Amino acid sequence: MPDWTLVALQIKGKTRRFVQSTLVKQDTEALLAKRHGECNRCGACCKILFRCPFLGTDAEGQYTCRIYEKRFAQCRLFPLHAADLRELEEECSYTFSAAPERAAPRAVGEPAGE
């Protein structure tokens, strides 16, 4: 039986990534700067909701994209947010920098912290 919470999360994520990469075309450089690591070719991102028809394996058994040079924008950007990794059923080698913490607002007349 499918985990419907995960399925709902994956549908929401796929839709967001499609809109973000195709329609909005938001500047992604700042987001990608927070991403660290390299693809370990686990294929987990190509199996969100369904197995991508372009996902293949090479002679060593590693996953490979059959249209890598012409792959879709949302594939090129995955993962764009740390939250994208929650959609995977396998471990991904990418990690993200923590967002810088914001200082708590000061009361009027309160001196700045040291």
Image (cartoon, rainbow, N blue to C red):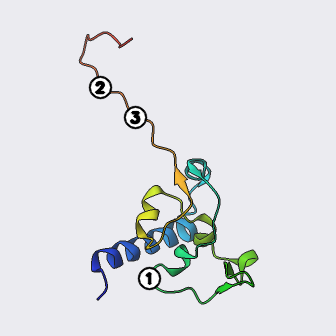
Q: Please state the horizontal and vertical placement of residue 60, each as a whole percent of the image.
A: 72, 80
Task: Identify the element where label 2 is drawn.
Answer: loop
Expressed as whole percent of the image width and height from the top left, the position of residue 17 reads 50, 68
| Residue 101 marker | 3
The alpha-carbon separation of the residues under discs 3 and 1 comes to: 34 Å
Left or right, residue 106 beside residue 80? left
- The kind of residue tagged 3 is Glu
Q: Amino acid at mark 2?
A: Pro
Does residue 22 appear left or right of residue 62 in this picture? left
Q: Are marks 1 and 2 in contact (CB under 8 Å)?
A: no
In this rendering, which labeled residue sits more in front, label 1 or label 2? Answer: 1
Residue occupied by mark 2: 105
User: Mark 1 = which residue?
Assistant: 49
In the rendered image, the quadrant that contains the N terminus is bottom left
Does label 1 or label 2 sit earlier along the sequence?
1
Say what amino acid the circle numbered 1 marks: Leu
Residue for point 58% across, 63% down: 25
Helix, strand or loop under label 3: loop
